Every structure is written in C-alpha cells, then in structure tokens.
Amino acid sequence: MRDRYPEPGEMTVRKLVELLGGRLLLSSSTGEDGYSRAVTSPDINRPGLALTGYTHRFLYDRIQIFGETEITFLTSLDTEGRTRALANIFQFPVYCSVVTKGLEPPAELAAAAHDRDCALFRSPRDTTPLIHDLTGYLSEVFAPRKSVHGTLVDVFGVGLLVTGRSAIGKSEAVLGLVERGHRLVADDIVRIRRTGDLLLGTGDTLMGYHMEIRGLGMVNVPALYGIRSIKDRQQVDMEVRLVDWSQRPDFDRTGLDKTTTTYLGIKIPQVVLPVLPGRNLALLLEVAAMNFLLTSRGVDVPAALDKRLIERMQDSGV
Amino acid sequence: MFQQNVTVPNRLGVHARPAALIVKKASAFKSEIGIAAGGEEVNGKSIMGVMTLAAGQGTELLVTASGPDEQRAVEELCALIGSGFGED
C-alpha cells in the first residue's frame, strides 16, 4: 500500500474497524450492525448533553463517544429513564458509537443501537487518548487532497515536485536523479494531501513505481535500480517547473526573486527551469534541492553576493 | 559597431537587480554587446560579467554593440541605465 489512508468516500464503519480496530481495541457489541454505514466526519461528539434532552445542534453525523460521564449518567437512571435518554439521540441517524474505559454499555443502549442499525463498540482504552487516535487518523482521511501532473522525487531529503508540459522531460530528468542515488516517490500522477501545514505526496497504488520513458515504454524503477530507489511518501518541499527555453525568455537571472506556488492553501517555493537540449536536468535539480537546503537554513546566496557587491561599490567611493 | 557613454545615476549603482535588468534587456538583441568601465569590458549578456564591473553611482559606462540591431541595442541599454533602474 502506497498510501494507507482510504478516500473519504470509502470510509465506512467496516473500514474503520479494519484500519483502526486494532489500535483502538474496538470490539463490537452488536455484531456487524451499522458496518456498511458511512463515516462522514473526522470529528467526534460527546453525547452527554443530548442524552439529557438538549438535542438542539446535536452532532449526529459524528462518531459518538460514551465515556465515563455518559455511562454513569445512564446508569444513574432507571430503565425507563435510560430508554428515554437514549431515544433523544437515536431519533437522529447516529451510525457509530464507542463506549470507552472498558465500561459495560447498558442493555438499552445496545438495543437502541441495534434497532437503528448503529454500530456499537467497546474499548478498554481511556477516553481522551482514544479520541486523539481516532480523530488524528480520521483527519488524515478527510484531509484536503489533489492530484497533480508531475513527478515527485526525494533529493537529499528535499521533496521536489517536478512539473511541466507533457514530454518536456520530467521523467527523464527524474530517472537521472534515481541513477544518482535519489528516490522516486511518484511519476506522472502525484497525489498530494495536506496535513497541518505540510503537503505529503504519494503515488498511485495501481501504477506503483513504473515510469514511462518515451521510446522505451514502461520501465519498473525498483526492478532496475533496487529498493533504495523508491520511497512511499514524501513531503512536498518545492516545485521545479520545467518550461521551454523559448517560452520563458525573462526567467530569473539572479535568484534574488523568490517565487512561490500554492497547493491546497500551502505556499511552497517554486523554481522555473528553462529546458534546452543538452542541459543536464538531473544535475540542475540536485542543485535546486541543495539551494533549498541552504535557503531553509537562512543562507541566501544571491542576497549575500548583492550585499558584497554594493559594499564594494561604496568602498571604492565612486 | 555602435557605442555610447552613460553614467550610472542611482545611489546603489549596478548591483544584482540592475545587472539582471541589463542582461535581460541585452539578451533581447541579436548583436554582441559589451559594457566597459575603467578599461575593463564584459559581455553585456552575462549577469556575472555585469556584476563584476562593480559600477557604483557616477561610474561612466561605455556600451558597445555590433550586429544587426546594434544602434537600437545601445540606445535602449543607455536609456535603461540612465533611468536609474527605477531606483533613487
């Protein structure tokens, strides 16, 4: 599996059990009730207030967490009171509930869940850490994402997203990088996901680590270059956009102008690299990555050179 | 061949940004372009060359071009340098 996170639309209760049941120590109290229902939000809800009857703004589309507060409240009521309290929330299409801390779900809760095709799980884990793990995972699943036409490669630990029109030489350039010991993450289609302030890129699970090299057809990168030539996931640190030399006569000649590009609301540096036959693109991409490392450590080469030049001119007293 | 003198008017002189503007302008012409200061001539299409001149405020530059568009090249480059590159 390249990316262990399913698409948001694939996220069902069954998938949740499959992917997270082990970590959350979930065991179902109602068989496979509710397993086919969709998980539609990365957030959870504590239904305490709704159980008491205040159902205004009840967040029924979230996974409901029954912690010690909810369970002790329910057990403080008599059977009729519990049924009434639970009816407050099960009048909504609740699809998944988790009872934490190894607490025993009251019989009325199991019955109401079963009646409404709602999954009901128990977990011995404490409430807060369980919520952190659950929402942490689900927020990755529901993270904003997009597919980009380009190639993602790890060069000295820097995630370079190489873009440009078809047939401009992205794959050949990246093959050159792989040959120099760098690692291919994705070719042609790069799936980018935003987690926090970071962009994470992976490839397509079907295409694996194949690349199309015009004239040679499909090549299998790890079969040719070994396991060290590939990587599952990589942070996208900068974009290098390959352009035709003729199309961009006014590209930056100093490196003083820092351009950026935005993916999923995150700004990353962008370098526009004009392509000319005979240019060693792999070498240039390596330098771009090293320049990124220098810049991210506060070294701005063009600015330093400019400063030195200005000082020289002022010293000479012209 | 066509040539003309121009004085650098801006306070910071021909530092990196003005140098980039000069080579960008020069590269748009077919002619060979040279820029000289104090007897040293550099290629007007080379950023490193133009920066090497270290032409501060008040420096007199000799812009030379030879080729099909030499006169226009020299005139436009002198106009650019004379304008102070939009700096003070």
Image (spheres, coloured by chain):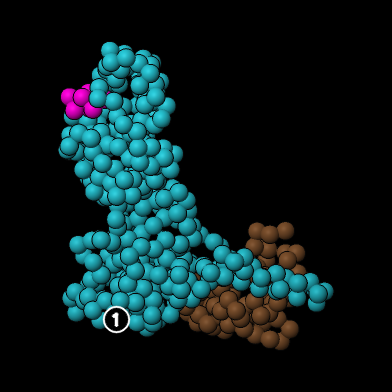
Chain colours: A cyan, B brown
* Residue A241 sits above or below residue A52 on the image: below
Residue that label 1 marks: A225
Magenta part, dominant SS: helix
- Mark 1: give few (<14), some (14-19) or many (20+) Cα within 10 Å: some
- What chain does badge 1 belong to? A
**Residue visible at 39% across and 21% down in the picture:** A73
State yes or no: residue A112 in magenta: yes
Q: Quadrant of residue A258?
A: bottom right
Can residue A205 be found in the magenta stretch?
A: no
Q: Nearer the viewer, residue A215 or A229?
A: A229
Q: Which residues are magenta?
A: A109-115
Q: Residue at x 34, y 69 (%)?
A: A231
Say what secondary structure mark 1 lies in.
helix
Q: Where does the image place residue A305, in percent across and percent down from the top left?
A: 66, 73
Tell whether A231 sits left or right of B65. left
The quadrant in which residue A69 appears is top left
Tell me if residue A32 can be seen. Answer: yes
Task: Find residue A165 and report its horizontal and vertical position in percent.
Answer: 31, 65
Quarter of the rendering occupied by the C terminus of chain A: bottom right
- Amino acid type at circle 1 is Tyr
Question: Looking at the figure, which quarter contains the N terminus of chain A?
Answer: bottom left
Q: Position of residue A101 (x, y in %)?
A: 38, 37
Q: Residue at x 41, y 50 (%)?
A: A195
